[in-house]
Image: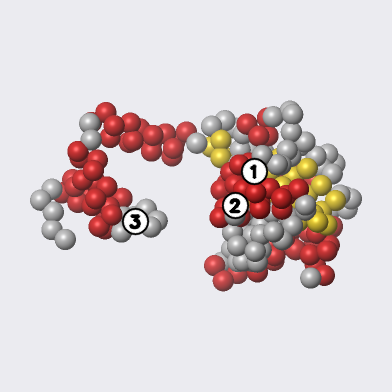
Amino acid sequence: MEFSSKHLEKAIEEIALLPGIGKRTALRLALHLLKQPQSQTTDLATALVNLKTKVKQCQSCHNISDQDICEICKDKSRDHSIICIVEDVRDVMAIENTEQFKGIYHVLGGKISPMEGVGPHQLNIETLVSKIKLGKVSEIIFALSSTMEGDTTNFYIYKQLQSSGHQLKTSTIARGISIGDELEYADEVTLGRSILQRVPFENSLKS
């Protein structure tokens, strides 16, 4: 594809690096931006720079936040004794949209996947165990996707919690979520019911 402008070509190359965006879609988006008022393009550029430079990771749960501690962790009306373990921030958003969960979260940042070179030490598991050792947590909810990698991660964390010597309730979301499904794609009603009707994690080991 030939371009009459190097600046246009560079913009298309960068846009095309985004997931799900091909060269043709990148071209269409770049030409669309060219037609917009400069203020709109400037606002977009500023928002993207702020996204990279000002968005932080919550020091407590690893959710995204504008502050060192996210709004969920700072909310004193939530039950801080119940922690819902999720794979990434998209799962936090999905569960929050159900308005059914009033505890707090812990974002692992992925799941154990030897095929992709992801091991336990590359996830936020140690900080979770440290929270448990403080003795203020009464229940852990495993809310990872029901895939082989998700189940492997659940079981690894479960064994880590057992070896920590702290007695606490462990549960997993009810299987209203189909086997192999990702949480972010579940409808809010199904996901909300899965949270409310969670079952003891030990039961999932027998299935």
The residue indicated by pointer 1 is: 98
Evaluate whether residue 128 shows in this view: no
Q: Amino acid at mark 1?
A: Thr
Quadrant in which residue 115 is drawn: bottom right
67, above or below 161, in the image = above
Q: Residue at x 56, y 48 (%)?
A: 90
- What secondary structure is found at the residue carrying circle 1? helix
Confirm or deny contact between disc 1 and disc 3 (CB under 8 A). no
Q: Position of residue 136 (x, y in %)?
A: 83, 39
The residue indicated by pointer 2 is: 187
Task: Please indicate whether residue 204 sits to the left or right of residue 123 in the image.
Answer: right
35, above or below 112, in the image = above
Residue density around tag 1, few if under 14, some if 14–19, many if 20 or more, within 10 Å? some
Q: Position of residue 206 (x, y in %)?
A: 82, 70
Q: Amino acid at mark 2?
A: Asp
Residue density around tag 2, few if under 14, some if 14–19, many if 20 or more, within 10 Å? some
Q: Residue at x 71, y 53 (%)?
A: 194
- Given residues 196 and 88, the one toward you in this image is 196
Q: Amino acid at mark 3?
A: Ile
